[in-house]
Amino acid sequence: MGTAIERKKTINPLRVMIYLGIVVGVIIPMIPQLIWAFSHRWLFPSVTPSEWSMRAWEYIANPNTKVLSSTLNSLIIAVSVTAISILVGIPAGKALGMYKFRGKSVIELIILSPSIIPGLAVTMGMQVIFIRIGLSDTMLGVIIVHLIPTIPYMTISMSGVFANYDPAFEEQARSLGASSMKTFFLITLPTVFPGIVTGGMFAFLISWGQYILTVMIGGGRVITLPLLLFSFAGSGDFALTSALSIIFLLPSIIILFITSKFLSGKSSAMGGFGNL
Amino acid sequence: MTRRVTIGLLLAPAMTLLIVLFFGGFLLGLMQSLTYMPLIGLNEPSLEAYRAIFTDEQFGKSFLLTFGISLSTTLLTVAFAIASAMALRHSFFGKRVVNFLYQFPITIPHIVIAIGTMFLFSQSGTFARLAYDIGLISDQGQFPQLVNDRLGLGIIYVYLWKQIPFVGIIVLAIMQTMGNDYEELARSLGATKMQTFKHILLPIIIPGILPASIICFAFTFGSYEVPFLLGRPYPAVLSILAYRLYDNVDLNARPQAMAMAVFMTVFLMLFVFAYKKLLKKAAGRD
Protein backbone atom coordinates (compact mmCIF):
# COMPACT_ATOMS: atom_id res chain seq x y z
CA MET A 1 0.00 0.00 0.00
CA GLY A 2 2.61 2.49 1.15
CA THR A 3 4.81 2.00 -1.90
CA ALA A 4 1.85 2.29 -4.25
CA ILE A 5 1.00 5.70 -2.81
CA GLU A 6 4.59 6.79 -3.02
CA ARG A 7 4.81 5.79 -6.65
CA LYS A 8 1.68 7.78 -7.36
CA LYS A 9 3.03 10.92 -5.78
CA THR A 10 2.24 12.87 -8.98
CA ILE A 11 -1.36 13.06 -7.67
CA ASN A 12 -1.23 16.54 -6.27
CA PRO A 13 -4.53 17.64 -4.63
CA LEU A 14 -4.14 21.22 -5.86
CA ARG A 15 -3.66 20.05 -9.42
CA VAL A 16 -6.67 17.73 -9.21
CA MET A 17 -8.72 20.68 -7.99
CA ILE A 18 -7.60 22.72 -10.99
CA TYR A 19 -8.60 19.91 -13.39
CA LEU A 20 -11.99 19.60 -11.71
CA GLY A 21 -12.32 23.38 -11.72
CA ILE A 22 -11.75 23.46 -15.49
CA VAL A 23 -14.29 20.70 -16.15
CA VAL A 24 -17.01 22.05 -13.85
CA GLY A 25 -16.29 25.74 -14.47
CA VAL A 26 -16.47 25.41 -18.24
CA ILE A 27 -19.55 23.17 -18.44
CA ILE A 28 -21.77 24.61 -15.73
CA PRO A 29 -22.76 27.96 -17.30
CA MET A 30 -23.86 26.13 -20.45
CA ILE A 31 -26.32 23.81 -18.68
CA PRO A 32 -29.24 26.14 -17.77
CA GLN A 33 -29.65 27.17 -21.42
CA LEU A 34 -29.80 23.54 -22.54
CA ILE A 35 -32.64 22.91 -20.08
CA TRP A 36 -34.48 26.20 -20.59
CA ALA A 37 -34.66 25.59 -24.35
CA PHE A 38 -36.98 22.61 -23.78
CA SER A 39 -38.99 23.95 -20.88
CA HIS A 40 -42.42 25.46 -20.78
CA ARG A 41 -42.96 26.46 -17.20
CA TRP A 42 -40.06 26.72 -14.79
CA LEU A 43 -40.88 28.86 -11.79
CA PHE A 44 -38.78 29.51 -8.71
CA PRO A 45 -37.88 27.43 -6.70
CA SER A 46 -38.17 24.30 -8.90
CA VAL A 47 -34.72 22.99 -9.79
CA THR A 48 -36.12 21.31 -12.91
CA PRO A 49 -38.91 22.59 -15.20
CA SER A 50 -42.41 21.47 -14.23
CA GLU A 51 -43.50 21.31 -17.87
CA TRP A 52 -41.44 20.50 -20.92
CA SER A 53 -42.19 21.83 -24.37
CA MET A 54 -40.84 22.18 -27.89
CA ARG A 55 -42.51 25.57 -28.32
CA ALA A 56 -39.21 27.45 -28.66
CA TRP A 57 -37.97 25.08 -31.35
CA GLU A 58 -41.25 25.25 -33.23
CA TYR A 59 -40.90 29.02 -33.25
CA ILE A 60 -37.32 28.78 -34.50
CA ALA A 61 -38.24 26.28 -37.23
CA ASN A 62 -41.07 28.51 -38.44
CA PRO A 63 -39.80 30.24 -41.61
CA ASN A 64 -42.14 33.20 -41.10
CA THR A 65 -40.35 34.48 -38.00
CA LYS A 66 -37.26 36.66 -38.08
CA VAL A 67 -35.04 33.74 -37.05
CA LEU A 68 -34.35 32.49 -40.57
CA SER A 69 -33.74 35.92 -42.10
CA SER A 70 -31.48 37.06 -39.29
CA THR A 71 -29.48 33.82 -39.47
CA LEU A 72 -29.02 34.43 -43.20
CA ASN A 73 -27.98 38.05 -42.57
CA SER A 74 -25.47 36.93 -39.94
CA LEU A 75 -24.05 34.32 -42.31
CA ILE A 76 -23.75 36.66 -45.30
CA ILE A 77 -22.07 39.34 -43.17
CA ALA A 78 -19.68 37.00 -41.37
CA VAL A 79 -18.65 35.15 -44.56
CA SER A 80 -17.99 38.42 -46.43
CA VAL A 81 -16.05 39.87 -43.50
CA THR A 82 -13.96 36.69 -43.28
CA ALA A 83 -13.21 36.67 -47.01
CA ILE A 84 -12.10 40.31 -47.06
CA SER A 85 -10.05 39.87 -43.87
CA ILE A 86 -8.25 36.87 -45.37
CA LEU A 87 -7.55 38.73 -48.62
CA VAL A 88 -5.96 41.73 -46.90
CA GLY A 89 -4.60 39.83 -43.87
CA ILE A 90 -2.40 37.36 -45.77
CA PRO A 91 -0.21 39.93 -47.53
CA ALA A 92 0.00 42.20 -44.47
CA GLY A 93 0.86 39.22 -42.25
CA LYS A 94 3.52 38.18 -44.72
CA ALA A 95 5.12 41.63 -44.67
CA LEU A 96 5.18 41.70 -40.86
CA GLY A 97 6.18 38.09 -40.35
CA MET A 98 8.93 37.76 -42.95
CA TYR A 99 10.53 41.16 -43.38
CA LYS A 100 12.43 43.51 -41.15
CA PHE A 101 12.09 47.12 -42.25
CA ARG A 102 12.25 50.66 -40.99
CA GLY A 103 9.04 51.84 -39.39
CA LYS A 104 7.86 48.28 -38.76
CA SER A 105 6.99 49.04 -35.14
CA VAL A 106 4.77 51.94 -36.25
CA ILE A 107 2.94 49.68 -38.71
CA GLU A 108 2.53 47.05 -35.98
CA LEU A 109 1.16 49.68 -33.62
CA ILE A 110 -1.39 50.81 -36.22
CA ILE A 111 -2.47 47.23 -36.88
CA LEU A 112 -2.66 46.43 -33.18
CA SER A 113 -4.52 49.57 -32.11
CA PRO A 114 -8.02 48.36 -33.04
CA SER A 115 -7.55 45.49 -30.59
CA ILE A 116 -6.84 48.05 -27.85
CA ILE A 117 -9.24 50.85 -28.72
CA PRO A 118 -12.91 49.83 -28.43
CA GLY A 119 -14.73 49.53 -31.77
CA LEU A 120 -17.66 51.39 -30.21
CA ALA A 121 -15.51 54.49 -29.76
CA VAL A 122 -14.42 54.78 -33.41
CA THR A 123 -17.72 53.65 -34.93
CA MET A 124 -19.55 56.49 -33.16
CA GLY A 125 -17.56 59.07 -35.08
CA MET A 126 -17.93 57.26 -38.37
CA GLN A 127 -21.70 57.04 -38.42
CA VAL A 128 -22.13 60.63 -39.66
CA ILE A 129 -20.12 59.85 -42.79
CA PHE A 130 -21.86 56.51 -43.26
CA ILE A 131 -25.22 58.31 -43.36
CA ARG A 132 -23.83 60.81 -45.89
CA ILE A 133 -22.49 58.16 -48.29
CA GLY A 134 -25.53 55.92 -47.87
CA LEU A 135 -23.82 53.08 -46.02
CA SER A 136 -25.85 53.56 -42.85
CA ASP A 137 -28.62 50.96 -42.32
CA THR A 138 -27.12 48.72 -45.03
CA MET A 139 -25.52 45.32 -44.89
CA LEU A 140 -22.46 46.63 -46.72
CA GLY A 141 -21.99 49.26 -44.02
CA VAL A 142 -22.16 46.59 -41.32
CA ILE A 143 -19.62 44.43 -43.19
CA ILE A 144 -17.25 47.40 -43.39
CA VAL A 145 -17.33 48.18 -39.65
CA HIS A 146 -16.91 44.51 -38.74
CA LEU A 147 -13.57 44.66 -40.57
CA ILE A 148 -12.16 46.95 -37.86
CA PRO A 149 -11.76 44.16 -35.27
CA THR A 150 -11.17 41.30 -37.75
CA ILE A 151 -8.36 42.68 -39.95
CA PRO A 152 -5.95 43.11 -37.00
CA TYR A 153 -6.77 39.63 -35.78
CA MET A 154 -6.19 38.05 -39.19
CA THR A 155 -2.98 40.01 -39.77
CA ILE A 156 -1.53 39.14 -36.36
CA SER A 157 -2.38 35.45 -36.84
CA MET A 158 -0.80 35.43 -40.29
CA SER A 159 2.33 37.25 -39.15
CA GLY A 160 2.79 34.48 -36.55
CA VAL A 161 2.47 31.87 -39.29
CA PHE A 162 4.84 33.66 -41.66
CA ALA A 163 7.42 34.20 -38.90
CA ASN A 164 7.93 30.42 -38.85
CA TYR A 165 7.88 30.13 -42.63
CA ASP A 166 11.10 29.41 -44.49
CA PRO A 167 11.43 31.76 -47.51
CA ALA A 168 14.12 29.50 -49.00
CA PHE A 169 11.39 27.38 -50.62
CA GLU A 170 10.05 30.40 -52.47
CA GLU A 171 13.53 31.38 -53.63
CA GLN A 172 14.15 27.87 -54.92
CA ALA A 173 10.86 27.85 -56.83
CA ARG A 174 11.66 31.27 -58.32
CA SER A 175 15.19 30.24 -59.25
CA LEU A 176 13.78 27.16 -61.01
CA GLY A 177 11.71 29.50 -63.16
CA ALA A 178 8.28 29.65 -61.45
CA SER A 179 6.42 32.94 -61.82
CA SER A 180 5.56 34.87 -58.67
CA MET A 181 1.89 33.87 -59.08
CA LYS A 182 2.83 30.22 -59.48
CA THR A 183 5.16 30.40 -56.48
CA PHE A 184 2.40 31.89 -54.37
CA PHE A 185 -0.22 29.29 -55.25
CA LEU A 186 2.05 26.23 -55.26
CA ILE A 187 4.50 27.02 -52.47
CA THR A 188 3.38 29.83 -50.16
CA LEU A 189 -0.34 29.14 -49.94
CA PRO A 190 -0.19 25.40 -49.10
CA THR A 191 2.38 26.02 -46.36
CA VAL A 192 0.42 28.72 -44.59
CA PHE A 193 -3.01 27.18 -45.20
CA PRO A 194 -3.55 25.93 -41.60
CA GLY A 195 -2.91 29.48 -40.38
CA ILE A 196 -5.44 30.87 -42.85
CA VAL A 197 -8.05 28.37 -41.66
CA THR A 198 -7.52 29.18 -37.98
CA GLY A 199 -7.33 32.96 -38.49
CA GLY A 200 -10.30 32.95 -40.87
CA MET A 201 -12.49 30.97 -38.50
CA PHE A 202 -11.77 33.40 -35.70
CA ALA A 203 -12.48 36.34 -37.98
CA PHE A 204 -15.81 34.65 -38.75
CA LEU A 205 -16.56 34.26 -35.04
CA ILE A 206 -15.67 37.88 -34.23
CA SER A 207 -18.11 39.10 -36.88
CA TRP A 208 -20.73 36.48 -35.94
CA GLY A 209 -20.73 37.66 -32.31
CA GLN A 210 -20.84 41.43 -32.95
CA TYR A 211 -23.76 43.26 -31.43
CA ILE A 212 -23.04 46.91 -30.80
CA LEU A 213 -21.26 47.71 -34.09
CA THR A 214 -24.16 46.13 -36.00
CA VAL A 215 -26.70 48.15 -34.00
CA MET A 216 -24.86 51.43 -34.55
CA ILE A 217 -24.33 51.11 -38.30
CA GLY A 218 -27.22 48.77 -39.16
CA GLY A 219 -29.56 51.16 -37.33
CA GLY A 220 -31.89 48.31 -36.36
CA ARG A 221 -32.63 47.68 -40.05
CA VAL A 222 -29.98 45.00 -40.50
CA ILE A 223 -31.15 42.34 -38.06
CA THR A 224 -28.54 39.70 -37.19
CA LEU A 225 -28.75 36.81 -34.72
CA PRO A 226 -27.14 38.72 -31.80
CA LEU A 227 -29.73 41.49 -32.22
CA LEU A 228 -32.56 38.98 -32.11
CA LEU A 229 -30.96 37.23 -29.13
CA PHE A 230 -30.73 40.51 -27.21
CA SER A 231 -34.33 41.36 -27.94
CA PHE A 232 -35.50 37.90 -26.78
CA ALA A 233 -33.36 38.13 -23.64
CA GLY A 234 -34.85 41.56 -22.95
CA SER A 235 -38.42 40.29 -23.41
CA GLY A 236 -37.90 37.69 -20.68
CA ASP A 237 -38.84 34.69 -22.84
CA PHE A 238 -36.10 32.44 -21.49
CA ALA A 239 -37.10 29.33 -23.48
CA LEU A 240 -36.86 31.18 -26.78
CA THR A 241 -33.67 32.99 -25.73
CA SER A 242 -32.05 29.66 -24.84
CA ALA A 243 -33.07 27.89 -28.03
CA LEU A 244 -31.80 30.76 -30.17
CA SER A 245 -28.63 30.89 -28.13
CA ILE A 246 -28.02 27.21 -28.95
CA ILE A 247 -28.48 27.94 -32.67
CA PHE A 248 -26.14 30.90 -32.31
CA LEU A 249 -23.57 28.59 -30.71
CA LEU A 250 -23.43 26.01 -33.51
CA PRO A 251 -20.66 27.61 -35.64
CA SER A 252 -18.50 27.93 -32.52
CA ILE A 253 -18.85 24.23 -31.76
CA ILE A 254 -18.04 23.24 -35.35
CA ILE A 255 -15.06 25.61 -35.43
CA LEU A 256 -13.85 24.34 -32.06
CA PHE A 257 -13.65 20.78 -33.39
CA ILE A 258 -11.83 21.88 -36.54
CA THR A 259 -9.33 24.18 -34.83
CA SER A 260 -8.69 22.36 -31.56
CA LYS A 261 -5.64 20.64 -32.99
CA PHE A 262 -4.22 23.91 -34.27
CA LEU A 263 -4.77 25.55 -30.91
CA SER A 264 -2.93 22.96 -28.85
CA GLY A 265 -0.23 25.46 -27.93
CA LYS A 266 2.14 24.56 -30.76
CA SER A 267 0.12 26.73 -33.09
CA SER A 268 1.90 29.67 -34.60
CA ALA A 269 -1.43 31.32 -35.34
CA MET A 270 -1.99 31.84 -31.60
CA GLY A 271 1.71 32.38 -31.00
CA GLY A 272 1.51 35.53 -33.10
CA PHE A 273 0.00 37.27 -30.07
CA GLY A 274 3.05 36.49 -28.00
CA ASN A 275 5.43 38.13 -30.47
CA LEU A 276 3.96 41.59 -30.58
CA MET B 1 10.47 45.02 -57.71
CA THR B 2 12.58 46.38 -54.92
CA ARG B 3 12.09 45.09 -51.40
CA ARG B 4 10.56 48.35 -50.21
CA VAL B 5 7.94 48.31 -52.93
CA THR B 6 7.10 44.68 -52.19
CA ILE B 7 6.59 45.41 -48.50
CA GLY B 8 4.55 48.49 -49.32
CA LEU B 9 2.28 46.57 -51.68
CA LEU B 10 1.80 43.75 -49.19
CA LEU B 11 0.78 46.16 -46.46
CA ALA B 12 -1.26 48.59 -48.56
CA PRO B 13 -4.73 46.96 -48.54
CA ALA B 14 -4.86 46.27 -44.79
CA MET B 15 -3.28 49.60 -43.85
CA THR B 16 -5.59 51.61 -46.12
CA LEU B 17 -8.70 49.99 -44.68
CA LEU B 18 -7.54 50.37 -41.08
CA ILE B 19 -6.32 53.95 -41.44
CA VAL B 20 -9.48 55.10 -43.22
CA LEU B 21 -11.89 53.29 -40.91
CA PHE B 22 -10.09 53.36 -37.62
CA PHE B 23 -8.22 56.64 -37.65
CA GLY B 24 -10.88 58.29 -39.78
CA GLY B 25 -13.48 57.21 -37.23
CA PHE B 26 -11.38 58.48 -34.34
CA LEU B 27 -10.74 61.88 -35.98
CA LEU B 28 -14.41 62.32 -36.85
CA GLY B 29 -15.32 61.45 -33.26
CA LEU B 30 -12.76 63.93 -31.97
CA MET B 31 -14.14 66.69 -34.21
CA GLN B 32 -17.71 65.98 -33.15
CA SER B 33 -16.67 65.94 -29.48
CA LEU B 34 -15.34 69.47 -29.99
CA THR B 35 -18.56 70.39 -31.82
CA TYR B 36 -16.33 71.29 -34.75
CA MET B 37 -18.09 70.19 -37.95
CA PRO B 38 -17.40 72.65 -40.78
CA LEU B 39 -19.57 70.45 -43.05
CA ILE B 40 -22.69 71.45 -41.16
CA GLY B 41 -21.54 74.95 -40.37
CA LEU B 42 -20.09 74.42 -36.90
CA ASN B 43 -16.81 76.29 -37.12
CA GLU B 44 -16.14 77.10 -33.46
CA PRO B 45 -14.46 74.27 -31.58
CA SER B 46 -15.58 74.08 -27.96
CA LEU B 47 -14.68 72.01 -24.92
CA GLU B 48 -18.22 72.19 -23.58
CA ALA B 49 -18.92 68.46 -24.11
CA TYR B 50 -15.82 67.52 -22.09
CA ARG B 51 -16.77 69.93 -19.33
CA ALA B 52 -20.25 68.41 -19.25
CA ILE B 53 -19.08 64.80 -18.93
CA PHE B 54 -16.29 65.47 -16.42
CA THR B 55 -18.57 67.44 -14.12
CA ASP B 56 -21.29 64.78 -14.20
CA GLU B 57 -21.03 62.84 -10.96
CA GLN B 58 -22.03 59.60 -12.71
CA PHE B 59 -18.91 59.75 -14.85
CA GLY B 60 -16.46 59.27 -11.97
CA LYS B 61 -18.39 56.33 -10.60
CA SER B 62 -18.64 54.77 -14.06
CA PHE B 63 -14.96 55.22 -14.66
CA LEU B 64 -14.01 53.60 -11.34
CA LEU B 65 -16.39 50.71 -12.00
CA THR B 66 -15.05 50.15 -15.53
CA PHE B 67 -11.44 50.40 -14.41
CA GLY B 68 -12.02 48.14 -11.40
CA ILE B 69 -13.73 45.46 -13.47
CA SER B 70 -11.01 45.56 -16.14
CA LEU B 71 -8.11 45.50 -13.71
CA SER B 72 -9.46 42.72 -11.51
CA THR B 73 -10.43 40.69 -14.59
CA THR B 74 -6.93 41.02 -16.05
CA LEU B 75 -5.07 40.20 -12.82
CA LEU B 76 -7.30 37.19 -12.07
CA THR B 77 -7.06 36.02 -15.69
CA VAL B 78 -3.25 36.07 -15.57
CA ALA B 79 -3.14 34.30 -12.18
CA PHE B 80 -5.60 31.57 -13.19
CA ALA B 81 -4.05 31.20 -16.64
CA ILE B 82 -0.59 30.55 -15.17
CA ALA B 83 -1.92 28.18 -12.49
CA SER B 84 -4.04 26.17 -14.95
CA ALA B 85 -1.34 26.05 -17.63
CA MET B 86 1.16 24.74 -15.07
CA ALA B 87 -1.28 22.03 -14.02
CA LEU B 88 -2.02 21.11 -17.64
CA ARG B 89 1.67 20.56 -18.36
CA HIS B 90 1.60 17.30 -16.41
CA SER B 91 0.20 14.11 -17.87
CA PHE B 92 -2.83 12.72 -16.07
CA PHE B 93 -5.87 10.54 -16.56
CA GLY B 94 -8.40 12.30 -18.79
CA LYS B 95 -5.96 14.90 -20.05
CA ARG B 96 -7.44 14.96 -23.55
CA VAL B 97 -10.93 15.70 -22.25
CA VAL B 98 -9.70 18.42 -19.88
CA ASN B 99 -7.57 19.95 -22.66
CA PHE B 100 -10.55 20.02 -25.00
CA LEU B 101 -12.79 21.64 -22.38
CA TYR B 102 -10.04 24.14 -21.59
CA GLN B 103 -10.12 25.39 -25.20
CA PHE B 104 -13.91 25.33 -25.35
CA PRO B 105 -14.55 28.94 -24.13
CA ILE B 106 -12.28 30.46 -26.79
CA THR B 107 -14.80 30.03 -29.60
CA ILE B 108 -17.98 30.65 -27.57
CA PRO B 109 -19.53 34.11 -28.10
CA HIS B 110 -19.60 36.39 -25.04
CA ILE B 111 -23.36 36.84 -25.37
CA VAL B 112 -24.09 33.12 -24.94
CA ILE B 113 -22.04 32.81 -21.80
CA ALA B 114 -23.47 36.07 -20.43
CA ILE B 115 -26.99 34.67 -20.81
CA GLY B 116 -25.85 31.39 -19.20
CA THR B 117 -24.37 33.34 -16.29
CA MET B 118 -27.63 35.21 -15.82
CA PHE B 119 -29.60 31.93 -15.68
CA LEU B 120 -27.11 30.44 -13.25
CA PHE B 121 -26.35 33.21 -10.76
CA SER B 122 -29.39 35.50 -10.71
CA GLN B 123 -31.67 35.59 -7.68
CA SER B 124 -34.11 33.31 -9.48
CA GLY B 125 -31.34 31.31 -11.14
CA THR B 126 -30.21 27.72 -10.76
CA PHE B 127 -27.97 28.33 -7.75
CA ALA B 128 -30.65 30.33 -5.92
CA ARG B 129 -33.07 27.43 -6.50
CA LEU B 130 -30.56 24.91 -5.20
CA ALA B 131 -29.90 27.09 -2.15
CA TYR B 132 -33.66 27.24 -1.49
CA ASP B 133 -33.96 23.47 -1.91
CA ILE B 134 -31.34 22.68 0.69
CA GLY B 135 -32.75 25.31 3.03
CA LEU B 136 -29.97 27.90 2.86
CA ILE B 137 -32.43 30.62 1.90
CA SER B 138 -36.19 30.87 2.41
CA ASP B 139 -36.78 33.60 -0.13
CA GLN B 140 -35.34 34.63 -3.51
CA GLY B 141 -34.27 37.99 -2.11
CA GLN B 142 -31.95 36.35 0.41
CA PHE B 143 -29.73 34.98 -2.32
CA PRO B 144 -26.72 37.30 -2.77
CA GLN B 145 -26.74 39.54 -5.82
CA LEU B 146 -24.13 37.98 -8.08
CA VAL B 147 -25.35 39.42 -11.38
CA ASN B 148 -26.52 43.00 -11.98
CA ASP B 149 -24.59 43.67 -8.79
CA ARG B 150 -22.73 46.74 -7.56
CA LEU B 151 -19.23 45.35 -8.19
CA GLY B 152 -19.81 43.77 -11.58
CA LEU B 153 -19.16 40.22 -10.32
CA GLY B 154 -21.25 38.64 -13.07
CA ILE B 155 -19.39 40.65 -15.70
CA ILE B 156 -16.01 39.61 -14.27
CA TYR B 157 -17.09 35.96 -14.23
CA VAL B 158 -17.94 36.01 -17.96
CA TYR B 159 -14.64 37.62 -18.92
CA LEU B 160 -12.65 35.20 -16.77
CA TRP B 161 -14.49 32.29 -18.38
CA LYS B 162 -13.57 33.61 -21.84
CA GLN B 163 -10.07 34.94 -21.19
CA ILE B 164 -8.35 32.40 -18.93
CA PRO B 165 -8.00 29.82 -21.74
CA PHE B 166 -6.92 32.51 -24.22
CA VAL B 167 -4.01 33.56 -21.99
CA GLY B 168 -3.49 30.02 -20.67
CA ILE B 169 -2.82 28.61 -24.13
CA ILE B 170 -0.18 31.27 -24.70
CA VAL B 171 1.43 30.36 -21.34
CA LEU B 172 1.42 26.69 -22.39
CA ALA B 173 3.12 27.62 -25.67
CA ILE B 174 5.78 29.64 -23.83
CA MET B 175 6.50 26.79 -21.41
CA GLN B 176 6.69 24.33 -24.29
CA THR B 177 9.32 26.45 -26.07
CA MET B 178 11.24 26.91 -22.83
CA GLY B 179 11.43 23.18 -22.02
CA ASN B 180 12.31 21.77 -18.60
CA ASP B 181 16.06 22.38 -18.62
CA TYR B 182 16.14 25.66 -16.69
CA GLU B 183 13.81 24.41 -14.01
CA GLU B 184 15.68 21.13 -13.60
CA LEU B 185 18.96 22.96 -13.38
CA ALA B 186 17.60 25.31 -10.73
CA ARG B 187 16.14 22.40 -8.75
CA SER B 188 19.38 20.43 -8.97
CA LEU B 189 21.25 23.43 -7.58
CA GLY B 190 18.95 23.33 -4.58
CA ALA B 191 16.24 25.86 -5.43
CA THR B 192 12.85 25.14 -3.86
CA LYS B 193 9.73 24.77 -6.00
CA MET B 194 8.65 28.26 -5.01
CA GLN B 195 12.05 29.76 -5.84
CA THR B 196 12.11 28.01 -9.22
CA PHE B 197 8.65 29.36 -9.97
CA LYS B 198 9.49 32.89 -8.89
CA HIS B 199 12.94 33.23 -10.41
CA ILE B 200 12.78 30.96 -13.46
CA LEU B 201 9.20 30.50 -14.67
CA LEU B 202 7.60 33.87 -13.94
CA PRO B 203 10.32 36.05 -15.55
CA ILE B 204 9.93 34.01 -18.74
CA ILE B 205 6.12 33.84 -18.74
CA ILE B 206 5.19 37.40 -17.79
CA PRO B 207 6.78 39.26 -20.74
CA GLY B 208 5.31 36.64 -23.11
CA ILE B 209 1.75 37.19 -21.95
CA LEU B 210 2.08 40.96 -21.77
CA PRO B 211 0.38 41.63 -25.14
CA ALA B 212 -2.44 39.18 -24.38
CA SER B 213 -3.04 40.72 -20.96
CA ILE B 214 -3.14 44.21 -22.47
CA ILE B 215 -5.71 42.97 -24.99
CA CYS B 216 -7.76 41.46 -22.11
CA PHE B 217 -7.71 44.71 -20.18
CA ALA B 218 -8.61 46.86 -23.18
CA PHE B 219 -11.35 44.51 -24.35
CA THR B 220 -12.96 44.40 -20.92
CA PHE B 221 -12.65 48.17 -20.62
CA GLY B 222 -14.41 48.92 -23.89
CA SER B 223 -16.91 46.18 -24.53
CA TYR B 224 -20.63 46.71 -24.37
CA GLU B 225 -22.51 43.42 -24.66
CA VAL B 226 -21.64 41.73 -21.34
CA PRO B 227 -22.23 44.74 -19.04
CA PHE B 228 -25.44 45.45 -20.96
CA LEU B 229 -26.79 42.03 -19.95
CA LEU B 230 -25.17 41.65 -16.52
CA GLY B 231 -24.54 45.19 -15.30
CA ARG B 232 -26.61 47.73 -13.42
CA PRO B 233 -28.27 50.72 -15.02
CA TYR B 234 -26.56 52.94 -12.45
CA PRO B 235 -23.63 53.22 -12.24
CA ALA B 236 -23.10 51.72 -15.68
CA VAL B 237 -19.75 51.08 -17.34
CA LEU B 238 -18.36 53.78 -19.65
CA SER B 239 -19.29 52.07 -22.93
CA ILE B 240 -22.92 51.85 -21.85
CA LEU B 241 -22.91 55.45 -20.67
CA ALA B 242 -21.36 56.56 -23.98
CA TYR B 243 -23.89 54.64 -26.06
CA ARG B 244 -26.77 55.97 -23.97
CA LEU B 245 -25.65 59.54 -24.73
CA TYR B 246 -25.13 58.65 -28.39
CA ASP B 247 -28.60 57.12 -28.68
CA ASN B 248 -30.25 60.03 -26.86
CA VAL B 249 -33.20 61.70 -28.62
CA ASP B 250 -31.60 65.00 -27.66
CA LEU B 251 -28.94 65.45 -30.36
CA ASN B 252 -27.05 67.85 -28.08
CA ALA B 253 -25.93 64.81 -26.12
CA ARG B 254 -24.03 63.48 -29.15
CA PRO B 255 -20.86 65.56 -28.61
CA GLN B 256 -20.78 64.24 -25.02
CA ALA B 257 -20.95 60.67 -26.33
CA MET B 258 -18.05 61.44 -28.66
CA ALA B 259 -16.12 63.11 -25.84
CA MET B 260 -16.52 59.96 -23.77
CA ALA B 261 -15.34 57.82 -26.70
CA VAL B 262 -12.28 60.06 -27.09
CA PHE B 263 -11.63 59.86 -23.35
CA MET B 264 -11.77 56.03 -23.45
CA THR B 265 -9.40 55.94 -26.43
CA VAL B 266 -6.86 58.33 -24.92
CA PHE B 267 -7.04 56.66 -21.51
CA LEU B 268 -6.41 53.20 -22.98
CA MET B 269 -3.48 54.47 -25.06
CA LEU B 270 -1.89 56.16 -22.04
CA PHE B 271 -2.53 53.10 -19.87
CA VAL B 272 -0.88 50.72 -22.35
CA PHE B 273 2.04 53.10 -22.76
CA ALA B 274 2.58 53.48 -19.00
CA TYR B 275 2.19 49.75 -18.43
CA LYS B 276 4.83 48.91 -21.05
CA LYS B 277 7.22 51.57 -19.68
CA LEU B 278 6.78 50.29 -16.14
CA LEU B 279 7.51 46.72 -17.14
CA LYS B 280 10.56 47.74 -19.14
CA LYS B 281 11.85 49.59 -16.09
CA ALA B 282 11.18 46.59 -13.86
CA ALA B 283 12.98 44.30 -16.33
CA GLY B 284 15.94 46.70 -16.48
CA ARG B 285 16.38 46.60 -12.71
CA ASP B 286 16.79 42.80 -12.58
Image (cartoon, grey):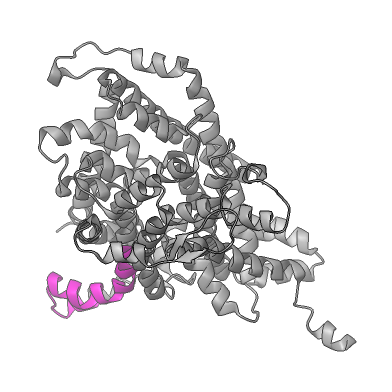
Residue B89: x and y in percent read 62, 72
Q: Is residue B84 above or below residue A44?
A: below
Q: Nearer the viewer, residue B205 or A116?
A: A116
- In the image, taking residue B158 as reference, residue B27 lies left or right, namely left
Residue A186: in magenta span: yes
- In the image, taking residue A20 as reference, residue A175 lies left or right, namely left
Residue B98: x and y in percent read 57, 73
Q: Residue furthest right?
A: A2
Q: Quadrant of residue A241?
A: bottom left
Q: Nearer the viewer, residue B266 or B180?
A: B266
> Which residues fall within the magenta stretch?
A172-201
Residue B184: in magenta span: no
- In the image, taking residue B27 as reference, residue B211 lies left or right, namely right
Type of secondary structure dominating the magenta stretch: helix
Residue A23: x and y in percent read 59, 69
Q: How many marks?
A: 0
